[in-house]
Image (cartoon, helix red, strand yellow):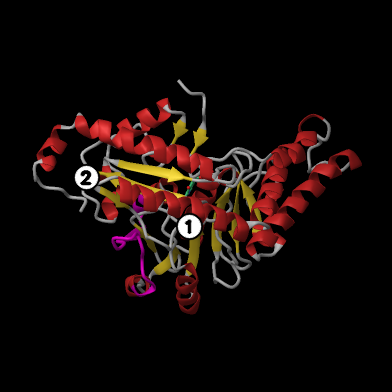
Amino acid sequence: MNNRFVYLDHAATTAMRPEVYEAMQSYFIERYGNPSSIYSFARDGKKAIEGARDKVAGALGARAEEIFFTGSGTEADNWAIKGVAYANKFKGNHIITTSIEHHAVLNTCQYLEGDGFEVTYLPVDENGLVTPEQVERAIKSNTILISIMFANNEIGTIQPIAEIGKLTRKRGIYFHTDAVQAVGNVPINVAEMNIDLLSLSGHKFYGPKGIGSLYIRKGVKITSFLHGGAQERGRRASTENVPAIVGLGKAIEMASSNIEEESRKLIALRDRTIDEVMKGIPFVKLNGHRSQRLPGNINFSFEFIEGESVLLMLDMKGIAASTGSACTSGSLDPSHILLAIGVLPELANGSLRLTFGEENTQEDVDYLLEVLPAIVERLREMSPLYEGVEIGGKSYAV
Ligand SMILES: *Cc1c(COP(=O)(O)O)cnc(C)c1O
């Protein structure tokens, strides 16, 4: 056996950068004061929080007072959607979202449906895109919120966020985007893109887990998320997680200062892998938009085999990948995202998500390209479905 390890699951989570870890360290045992305390010893923590807030604001083109720290990306999504829904109930009860959102958005919307709200789930095209025209057509007189993800966590497709922002602003309807996969990978400016609320999560861009942030444009009507003390201007009470907030600030600063160069590198790894796999392995389909996708994202469907089996065999070769989102692994249902872009259930079960990140190299791609074709071939040899195709049977992928 070899002891090589290649991590290709950056959409699930990323390793913290050493610089981020270092920035956090002193806030655990040395500078542990409660940021709400008055004495000078505690002021360090308060200052560190405000420094991190400035960094998040700077990365998004927002103002510091529009940035609120949360316990995760999931929490930011919950707060944005429930908070706007309940605070604007007097205006209407209709929400528009898409059928390919992360469960943090989908299940929150479903929860609200049980509480008197009406939700439209927009379908997407075969590339995973919604159009601004579709959004416009779905708007009704009682629409209060539109929530559309910036970039998809499984297939990487990037939505026309600025165009949607333009039309929602014109109509005076709040626009939330789950940008958890996009932050640090794609340039974002909430002011230029007319975004009213934006969710992000530290562990998706080399920061700590269990910390996120919600951008709330000044003037947006939203309920408080946690009731208690005066932290986060009374909107999200509880003693701040100072080390994690500091880590989030450092991570977003580092990720956003380097987007262009990093994305050029990731696109090179991505496109070489896509080209070689499509050339070298028959009956394979690329899911998601070919170019309007996250720099590090690949999602393939291999016909006649199960994605889970590919994962297990890649794992034996020291390669960590995914079949879809980490949150749904363990469930054998085909991904709601792949079904929404029209992938047949037979193919959706054969999907493999490879997501590259900053530590990946061309050598990692070499290694992947060395082992993947053999794995696919071996699994197909064991598949009764494949036998038929070799002698001229039916294929779905091509
Ligand atoms: C990971 C992810 C989330 C959830 O973020 P957590 O911080 O893990 O709760 C939400 N939306 C998308 C698109 C994600 O990729």
Q: Is residue 123 magenta?
A: yes
Q: Nearer the viewer, residue 168 or 84?
A: 168
User: Mark 2: is the Cβ under 8 angstroms from ligand 1?
Assistant: no
Residue beneath disc 1: 86
* Residue type of the residue flagged with mark 1: Tyr
Identify which residue is drawn at 55% across, 61% down.
197
Q: Position of residue 30 (x, y in %)?
A: 83, 31
The residue at the far top in this view is 1
Label disc, if present, on residue 345 of the rendered structure: 2
Q: Is residue 354 magenta?
A: no
Question: Dot 1: what SS?
Answer: helix
Tell me if residue 374 comes above or below residue 263 in the rendering: above
Q: Position of residue 363 (x, y in %)?
A: 52, 41
Q: Nearer the viewer, residue 283 or 214?
A: 283
Relative to 195, is 233 on the left or the right?
A: right
Relative to 344, is 43 on the left or the right?
A: right
Identify which residue is drawn at 36% across, 56% down.
288
Judge whether residue 230 can be spotted in this image.
no
Q: Position of residue 124 (x, y in %)?
A: 31, 62
Give the mark, 2 or 1, whose residue is nearer the N terminus: 1
* Residue type of the residue flagged with mark 2: Pro
Question: Dot 2: what SS?
Answer: helix
**Contact between labelled residues 1 and 2, with CB atoms less than 8 Å apart:** no
Q: Position of residue 117 (x, y in %)?
A: 36, 58
What span is colored magenta in the figure? Answer: 110-133
Identify which residue is drawn at 40% across, 37% down.
370
User: Mark 1: is the Cβ under 8 angstroms from ligand 1?
Assistant: no
Alpha carbons under labels 2 and 1: distance apart:
37 Å
Q: Find residue 229 and report its image quarter.
A: top right
Tell me if residue 168 comes above or below residue 203 in the rendering: below
Q: Find residue 313 and report its image quarter.
A: top left
Q: Nearer the viewer, residue 381 or 173?
A: 381
